[in-house]
């Protein structure tokens, strides 16, 4: 664990050094690191705790639904802490002042939890059950399933606030929760890989083909749900 932390600390210090040099020539990155190192590490640690809290909530829901209704709506959970380089880039891209307080105030997606389901209806059932929990506060919802992005991207995104319970205090932390079916996740992961290939020939043809794949995946999702014959669980029944 110590080694991982050391590597992570090295990574963000590198990110700050290189990004500052690229974007903020007037400031001294070494001075910033000296003054903010501890606060930045502490903030990242709180986000890691928030990820654990939210992951546990979904594991508990899956366990309970498995016991009571013989269903395991969650196929997998993938969590990630936004990388130091992405944090620095996003702050600079959006022109936010660069301080630890500003990172916490302005970025909603440092802690990310992705919940993958087999069927689309499970997404809404799980998000409803999650949002009914007393200590979860919904800050923002973007439903890219009802309203897919023009490129075909589908997912339900929630920004929530969750408490983390420290030894002598409680802190509220923001977490981005993305819900996707297996096929939405497969499409998004593959699209991300293709989009970040710099040498793609005929990008507009690729965009059209990717949109077509997203629409095919959505049809398959619906068809698989019908074939399964399962009735979506109404939240009142829980
Ligand atoms: P990563 O690697 O996941 O960190 P906001 O955060 O609300 O200020 P933003 O970032 O536009 O504004 O939010 P939005 O639209 O909710 O999307 C954020 C995340 O959704 C992205 O995070 C991706 O994970 C995913 N996403 C959104 N659109 C697409 C898309 O077209 N294709 C794919 N593959 N993923 C998408 P990051 O920060 O880009 O990346």
Image (tube, rainbow, N blue to C red):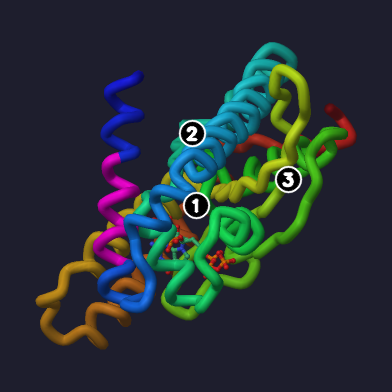
Secondary structure type for disc 1: helix
Which residue is drawn at the image coordinates 33% and 56% (left, top)?
A: 30
Q: CA distance from mark 2 to mark 1?
A: 19 Å
Q: Which residue is mark 3?
A: 161
Question: Within the magenta stretch, is there residue 14?
Answer: yes
Q: Are marks 3 and 2 in contact (CB under 8 Å)?
A: no
- Coordinates of residue 123 in the picture (x, y in percent): 63, 45
Pick the quarter of the image with the C terminus.
Answer: top right
Is 199 above or below relative to 146? Answer: below
- Coordinates of residue 162 in the picture (x, y in percent): 73, 38
Q: Which residue is mark 1?
A: 221
173 left or right of 28 in image: right
Q: CA distance from mark 3 to mark 2?
A: 19 Å
Which residue is drawn at the image coordinates 32% and 72% (left, top)?
A: 210
Query: Total of numbered circles in the picture?
Result: 3
For disc 3, the neighbor class at 10 Å (few under 14, some 14 to 19, many from 20) is many
The front one of 136 and 173 is 173
Secondary structure type for disc 3: strand
222 left or right of 125 in image: left
For disc 2, the neighbor class at 10 Å (few under 14, some 14 to 19, many from 20) is some
Single out the mark in the foreground, 3 or 2.
3
The front one of 153 and 69 is 153
The front one of 145 and 58 is 58
User: Does the beta carbon of the residue at mark 1 sit less than 8 Å from ligand 1?
Assistant: no
User: Does the beta carbon of the residue at mark 3 sit less than 8 Å from ligand 1?
Assistant: no
What range is drawn magenta here?
10-19
Which residue is drawn at the image coordinates 58% and 29% (left, top)?
A: 49
Q: Which residue is mark 2?
A: 77
């Amino acid at each position: 664990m110590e080694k991982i932390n050391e590597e992570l600390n090295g990574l963000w210090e590198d990110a700050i050094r290189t990004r500052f040099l690229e974007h903020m020539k007037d400031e001294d990155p070494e001075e910033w690191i000296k003054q903010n190192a501890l606060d930045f590490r502490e903030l990242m640690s709180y986000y890691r705790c928030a990820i654990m809290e939210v992951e546990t909530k979904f594991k508990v829901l899956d366990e309970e639904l498995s016991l009571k209704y013989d269903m395991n709506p969650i196929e997998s959970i993938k969590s990630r802490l936004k990388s130091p380089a992405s944090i620095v880039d996003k702050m600079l891209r959006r022109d936010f002042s660069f301080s630890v307080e500003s990172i916490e105030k302005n970025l909603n997606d440092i802690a990310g939890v992705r919940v993958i389901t087999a069927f689309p209806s499970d997404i809404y059932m799980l998000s409803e059950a999650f949002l009914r929990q007393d200590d979860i506060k919904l800050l923002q919802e973007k439903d890219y399933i009802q309203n897919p992005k023009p490129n075909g991207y589908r997912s339900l995104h929630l920004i929530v606030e969750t408490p983390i319970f420290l030894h002598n205090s409680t802190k509220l932390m923001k977490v981005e929760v993305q819900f996707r079916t297996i096929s939405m996740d497969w499409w998004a992961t593959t699209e991300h890989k293709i989009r970040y290939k710099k040498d793609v020939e005929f990008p507009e043809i690729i965009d059209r083909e990717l949109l077509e794949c997203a629409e095919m995946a959505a049809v398959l999702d619906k068809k698989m749900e019908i074939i399964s014959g399962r009735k979506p669980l109404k939240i009142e029944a829980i």
